[in-house]
Image (cartoon, helix red, strand yellow):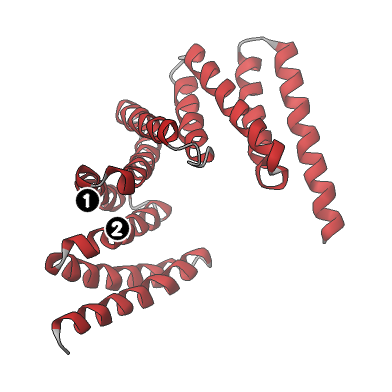
Amino acid sequence: LPGGARAVFSRVVASTFSSPAGVSRVENRLPEARRLYEDALDIRRTLALANPEAHLRALAITLNNLGLLSKEERRHDEARKYYEEALAIRRRLAATNPDAHLTGVATMLSNLSSLNRDEDRDAEARAQLEEALDIRRALAAKDPDIPLPDLASPLGSLALLNRHDGRDDEARRQYEEVVGIYRGLVATQPEVYLPDLALALSTFGALNTDEKRYPEARLQLEEALDIRRGLARRSAAVH
């Protein structure tokens, strides 16, 4: 095949490996998913060497998928290696096209922070979450159509970390913002975001319980319970 046709063929083959790998992962067929992702990774590395501009983003996605899979399998050293390489690629792409790639940087920072929290590397996790949050805020300030859940997710993770570290005042501010975001989203898409609001209220209620702010905790926990009961009733009616 000519060079251009060979690249197209290789890209199609890599996608052919990646798509069933995702299905295998969802179905908990993890060894099969790993083999497929690794095959896709080999192809995408070759393509990115020949034409980085066209293929680095796909390479970063495959690395992230392998990182997620490795974390599920508790192969943390491998997960870290994949995440860090994917983050380096995303930073390289964002340096020349921030509007297209800063979201990818924030995603990789959040994934790395999750791994670091699992390993009690709280200082690293905090730095990564704070950078991810700064990116999400900057993007949201520029574009009101940026999905607000993208902001709520690192906020909630940072609140959990602050609570774990005894930084309750910071956690409170973050929980308040998260609850406010989900209340706004529930106003327009209740079926999508009511479970997230219930979770945010529950975690905020737990903080208030720890601080003996029982009236606030009761209100939040009762609201969360009412939401979950309503969701359970609707689910039972559908099924």
Residue type for callout 2:
Leu
x and y percent of residue 84 in the render?
24, 46
x and y percent of residue 99 in the render?
32, 44
Image marks 1 and 2: residues in contact by CB distance under 8 Å: yes
1 or 2: mark nearer the eye: 1
**Residue at the outermost bottom position:** 1
Residue type for callout 1:
Ile
Whichever of callouts 1 and 2 sits on the residue coming sooner in the sequence is 2
> What residue is drawn where x is 71% and y is 36%?
187
Q: Residues within 10 Å of mark 2 (few under 14, many from 20)?
A: many
Q: Which residue is mark 1?
A: 89
Q: Residues within 10 Å of mark 1 (few under 14, many from 20)?
A: many
Q: Which residue is mark 2?
A: 63
Looking at the picture, tell me which residue is in the foreground, 105 or 2.
2
Task: Write down the quadrant of residue 230 in the picture.
Answer: top right
Question: Can the viewer see residue 194 in this picture?
Answer: no
Quadrant assignment for the C terminus:
bottom right
> What residue is drawn where x is 38% and y is 51%?
71
> What residue is drawn where x is 17% and y is 61%?
52
Residue 120 lies, with reference to residue 230, above or below; the image says above
Residue 87 lies, with reference to residue 53, above or below; the image says above
